[in-house]
Amino acid sequence: MRSPFISIIVPVLNGADTIESCLESVFSQSYTGWELVVIDGGSTDCTTDILRSHENKISYWSSELDHSIAHAWNKGLSAVGGEWIYFLGCDDRLYEGKVLETASSYLEKAGAEHIKLVYGRVNIVDSQGRTIETKGGPWTGIRETFFTKGMAIPHQGSFHSCELFNKYGKFDESFKIGADYEMLLRCLKKEKPLYMPDVIVANMSDRGLSNTAASLINVFREQITARKKNGLSTPFFWRLAQLTGLYTAAAARRLFGDRTGNRLLDLYRMLLTGKPPKWS
């Protein structure tokens, strides 16, 4: 089997502090069958200067206003030519130099078996590069959570076949935060993904997550909307428990500050996942 060609899409807006590291994690890959597309949302810092300095290694980049991350992803999809498509946040980086090389064997297998989504794990890291949490797991273990509770497949850990978008369409731009989840709901109601158990795909910055209480509430609402759109329900007691936890944490942040609010969010996540919080 021949090696698959991978298109990497990086959306960015005012990412001068992190975009260099993000791009370097792509440029340093041992695997050579890739192209890089960068969609800048009209940055006003020096992001475009950094992109311009790497033009010889970037297949395509543009800088113009967009109205959401989904809009940027869709613009990127219009510019790529790979058999497999990977989305990398400007605050994030590929885990190590052989990630694409290791993943390519799984992509070959998936292509032969007409599988349209391949995913591994991602490390959530803090500003010091320390791992806070590792996300991702076998489909058999996360399937129910994915369809009833929320995004259990890490987007920065996922490789999408171009056939997925040809068959199911692009991202729904009415979703401001949860477009990736809604897109995968459309696909995985009918398709089965392939999990890469030995591959950590990326280090994902916790700064790039919607991890404040207010943002998590918006994520929660959009995920419910995504399930409704795709004919799926959300258990009432799950909705009640999640909203209670989120609103309690939001109130604590306002009354007692971010540290106490964040600890309540950690305790809430512990109740959901069974994993102890990592407090510093």
Image (cartoon, rainbow, N blue to C red):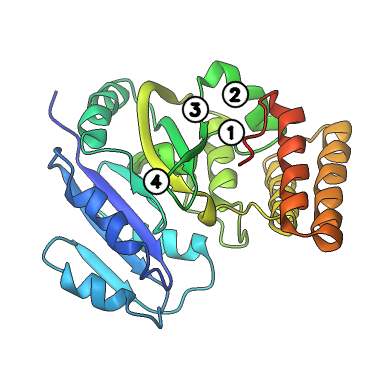
* Discs 4, 1 touching: Cβ within 8 Å: no
Residue 228 seen anywhere in this rendered image of the structure: no
For badge 4, the amino acid type reads: Asn
- Res. 254 in view: yes
Nearest to N terminus: mark 3 or mark 4: 4
Q: Position of residue 144 (x, y in %)?
A: 66, 23
Residue 49 in percent (x, y) is at 25, 78
Q: Could you tell me residue 67's position as x and y percent? A: 53, 73
SS category of the residue bearing label 4: helix
Instruction: Looking at the picture, tell me which residue is in the foreground, 91 or 149.
Output: 91
- Mark 3 or 1, nearer chain start: 1
Which label belongs to residue 191?
3
- Sequence order check, earlier mark of 2 and 4: 2
Look at discs 3 and 2 and give the one toward the viewer.
2
Q: Which mark is residue 152?
A: 1
Mark 3: amino acid: Glu
> Which residue is at 44% across, 64% downward?
72
User: 88 above or below 95?
Assistant: below
Q: CA distance from mark 3 to mark 2?
A: 15 Å
Tell me if 233 is positioned left or right of 75 in this view: right
- Kindly report the distance in space between the C-alpha atoms of the residues bearing marks 4 and 1: 23 Å
The dot on residue 236 is: none
The answer to whether mark 3 and mark 4 are in CB contact below 8 A is no
Read off the residue under disc 2. 142
Residue at the disc numbered 4: 166
Measured in 3D between alpha carbons, the distance from the residue under mark 1 to the one under mark 2, in whole angstroms, is 6 Å
- Foreground disc of the pair 2, 4: 2
Q: Assign a secondary structure to mark 3.
A: loop
